[in-house]
Amino acid sequence: DTEVTQTPKHLVMGMTNKKSLKCEQHMGHRAMYWYKQKAKKPPELMFVYSYEKLSINESVPSRFSPECPNSSLLNLHLHALQPEDSALYLCASSQDRGRNYGYTFGSGTRLTVV
Amino acid sequence: DAKTTQPPSMDCAEGRAANLPCNHSTISGNEYVYWYRQIHSQGPQYIIHGLKNNETNEMASLIITEDRKSSTLILPHATLRDTAVYYCIVRVGAGGTSYGKLTFGQGTILTVHP
């Protein structure tokens, strides 16, 4: 298995809702990442997990809460989002954080906040 | 992080080589150059990476200048399916909390014409 699987593919949520995005990989990768991508912009790093511990938080608002329950799974919990948080949320993984390993990206979850 | 400069857009005829340039004049000695591409509405796809030697794989070749201040990604026989945004990224080197980070710049929109 050489894929990163993200679910759901599309999500519409209200500003008072709580929802979660899920990311799964079975490549034995020990680093996992969340990126946010607005239309016609490059992906922006949000969080980095290394060996199931949060290593980097790029000053992301607390309404986004990441969780890494095990080495194969990464969640992003969403609460009280704003319409400007509508974007494509991408998950990626790599063998570890070392600079000599490429990332494998999922296809993303397209989130719309209404 | 070392920054990269790429032309915003390029065109290429189908079947011809596409040569995508990237400047990274502030790159450090232990930082790798990575190339990714993103086809519309998909997650970024790893293409190739290198440190100082030229690299080739089944997708592309990477030519890095001797002073490492610039590089060129070569797609030897471009097809319509190669139309995408191509990102040149310098990956943060070892040491410090940010090591291994992959930070995307604006990229080059490559359009392959029939």
Image (cartoon, coloured by chain):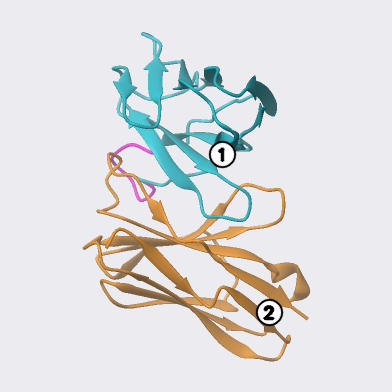
Left/right of residue A23 with respect to residue A96 in the rendered view: right
User: Which chain's colour is orange?
Assistant: A
Q: Does B29 lie within the magenta span?
A: no
Structural crowding at the residue carrying mark 1, measured as other residues with C-alpha within 10 Å and reported as few (<14), some (14–19) or many (≥20): few
Out of B25 and A108, give the one closest to the viewer.
Answer: A108
Give the position of the N terminus of chain A as an image quadrant: bottom left
On screen, residue A75 above or below A107: below
Measured as percent of width and height from the top left, residue A38 is found at 68, 57
The stretch in magenta equals B92-98
Structural crowding at the residue carrying mark 2, measured as other residues with C-alpha within 10 Å and reported as few (<14), some (14–19) or many (≥20): many
Left/right of residue B65 with respect to residue B5 in the rendered view: left
Which residue is the site of mark 1? Answer: B81
Give the position of the C terminus of chain A as an image quadrant: bottom right
Query: Do the numbered discs 2 and 1 sit on residues whose CB atoms are within 8 Å?
Result: no
Which residue is the site of mark 2? Answer: A81
The residue drawn where x is 69% and y is 81% is A12
Q: Quadrant of residue A13?
A: bottom right
On screen, residue B51 above or below B34: above
Asked which secondary structure carries label 1, the reply is helix
Q: Is the magenta region chiefly helix, strand or loop?
A: loop
Q: Amino acid at mark 1?
A: Arg
Q: Which is closer to the viewer, label 2 or label 1? A: 1
Q: Amino acid at mark 2?
A: Leu
Query: Residue under mark 1: which chain is it in?
Result: B
Q: Colour of chain B?
A: cyan
